[in-house]
Image (cartoon, grey):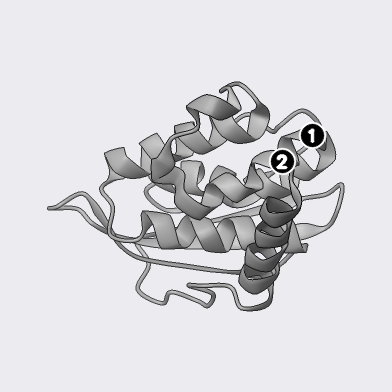
Amino acid sequence: MDFDFEELYQAVILDHSRKPRNFGALPDATVTVSGDNPTCGDEIALSLKIDAAADKLEAVGFTGSACSICMASTSLMTTKIKGKTRGEAETLLRDFQGMITGQMPESETPKSLGDLRLLSGVRKFPQRVKCATLGWHALKGCLAESGEGKFSVGTGDADL
């Protein structure tokens, strides 16, 4: 990372971790999935209100206590998926996974990820990848579930 990129990375991560977007309970949620990362203590619950007729993620919210990378990644994710269709959310999920795990070359990272691209450097730190993907694991669970769900991200669970 060059200096300007690193400075931007730090500013965005700190902003989203200190003032996470869409943070709070979603009382009329269609689905809620809770997840934790026992290796570092991160815990989050992601809730979606899905408009079944339009197959859109009408509202999104999350709660929990987690490290800066987990909070920032989840906050950034919620801003990107809100109002998207299930298919669009699944595409973002796949693209983020490819970027964060290094399965996708950095030069091929889609611009559609927006500020989420700032997290690409996390892939150099395998233990931190789990932090960055916890919210995304919850999203995957929400998109697959029709009710409540719970999971833990253990060793080797960076793949979504």
- Asked if residue 25 lies left or right of residue 34, the reply is left
Most foreground residue, 45 or 8 = 8
Check the image and name the residue furthest to the left. 53
Callout 2: SS: helix
Q: Residue at x 63, y 35 (%)?
A: 100
Q: Amino acid at mark 2?
A: Gly
Q: CA distance from mark 2 to mark 1?
A: 6 Å
Can you say whether 88 is above or below 78 in the image?
above
Q: Identify the residue position indicated by label 1 in the image.
A: 124
Q: Quadrant of the C terminus?
A: top right
Q: Residue furthest right?
A: 39
Q: Position of residue 23 (x, y in %)?
A: 54, 74
**Mark 2 and mark 1 residues within 8 Å of each other at the beta carbon:** yes
Q: Residue at x 79, y 34 (%)?
A: 124
Q: For the residue marked with disc 1, what is the amino acid?
A: Lys
Q: Which mark is residue 121?
A: 2
The residue shown at (78%, 37%) is 154
Question: Residue 26 appears in which quarter of the rendering?
Answer: bottom left
User: Where residue 97 sits: x, y (%)?
Assistant: 56, 33
Across and down, in percent, residue 45 comes to 58, 62
At mark 1, the secondary structure is helix
Query: Crowding near pointer 2: few (<14 within 10 Å), some, many (20+)?
Result: some
128 with respect to 61 (left or right) = right
Which label belongs to residue 21?
Answer: none
Res. 126 visible in picture? yes
- In the orientation shown, which residue stands out farthest toward the front? 3
Quick one: label 1, few (<14), some, or many (20+) residues within 10 Å?
few
Is 27 or 156 nearer to us in this picture?
A: 156
Q: Position of residue 83 (x, y in %)?
A: 28, 59
